[in-house]
Amino acid sequence: MSAKLNKRFLTNPIAFAGALPLVIEVTPGDTILKARGTHNVVASASRVVYWDINLDDTGQYHRVTIKSQWQGGYVPGYWLPWKVNDTNKITLVDKRRHKTGGTPLAFFTAQLTGCSIVVQGNRMTPTVYHTNARDSTFGGTEPTRKAHRAAIQEARLSRFDPPKRGGGEEIIVHAREYMSDAHPDVALRLAQQYQLVNIDPDEVLSRTEAGMTFGVLNTIQGWKFYLHRYLFLVSAGVQGAVRTWQGLGCQAIDPNGVGRPVRSRGGHGTTEIGASGRTLLAHVDDAIVAYTKRWHFNQSDQTAHALGVLRRIRTRGYLYLLSVVHYYLGLDDAPVQGVGAPLSTSSEFYADLRGQYERWLSG
């Protein structure tokens, strides 16, 4: 039965993931990660894994099992795990000496509940990042906090070199693409989901909304990547807890599907996290204008230095500017040397810059 399911998945992944949730339940625990300073790389010996799809005993979802070693019926593929507050990277190139099972035909990431996925490079040998910022905190509403974590994850891309193997645009998928509580209209979105599964919200005991990304290889056209969303509810029933799985759709990750370009061939992003239509640079300019309109007798050397840096880096691109803003607000490490110290939280310019950053996030 699993051979038929594996084939159906590879033949039409959107239809397959759209019919029932596709859930990774078993993963290899021996993936070798090599530290590269700003991120971790999946070692060549750990890139290729072996996967198999089965219908769960409840009949509500498809279960994906991934193993390090080949066994009969399993199909070669690639696996990218996650790491808390860090970034893992894999390039989809098979360096096995013995191609057991044939060509790797699929790629999987771990479940997504706030992480970002980045795909870069050419379609035949792309590179994928799985980046996490779980402990990066910021005030405000839950959508604002989710947007902030996404911004931290995105800004760190400025520290990674463009793909060595070349290719087109760099596409990123954020929590806003797959989690309802990353949006201001979360109440409406949740109500629609409960209506979809015909469950009274008052009976819900626990709720997990997640995404997962996977890729499928066409040996002629190359890799195509997808974002799949699903919902898992535990609710109170007459005879005890009721477990309900519900698929929430599957879409291609490309400029015409989900995800968006971050670094194009020119090196600059085309769209930003904030949805207000105003760029981060415009918000930074507003912070500088608001600060300079006031008369300052006690401007610190660090505030003066930060103002100078922010005025000079206008042409460095959105990702670099975002990294510097995070640093000055004490939200992340310095992206490069020469930016001075973080702003004091008691300074007026810190308040101006933080206020504009939050407006940009919640736009």
Image: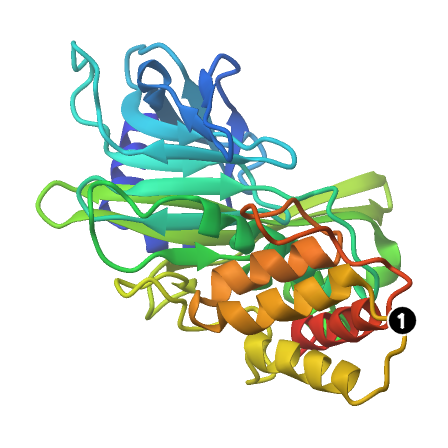
Q: Secondary structure at mark 1?
A: loop
Name the residue: 59% across, 82% down: 282
Number of other residues with Cα within 10 Å of mark 1, as a class: few under 14, some 14 to 19, many 20 or more: few
x and y percentages locating residue 44 in the rendered image: 31, 19
Spot occupied by residue 192 in the image (x, y as percentages of width and height)? 67, 71
* Quadrant in which residue 241 is drawn: top right
Quadrant for residue 240, please give it. top right
User: Which residue is found at the position 23% from the left and 29% from the top?
Assistant: 93
Q: Is residue 42 above or below residue 269?
A: above
- In this view of the protein, which residue sits in the foreground, 118 or 319? 319
- Residue 341 placement (x, y as % from top left): 72, 51
Left or right: where 37 falls relative to 148? left
| Colour basis | rainbow
Q: Quadrant of the C terminus?
A: bottom right
Q: Which residue is label 1 attached to?
A: 298
Say which amino acid is labelled 1: Asn
Left or right of 114, for residue 226: left
For residue 181, above or below residue 356: above
Q: Residue furthest bottom?
A: 293
Percent of width and height locating residue 218: 16, 44
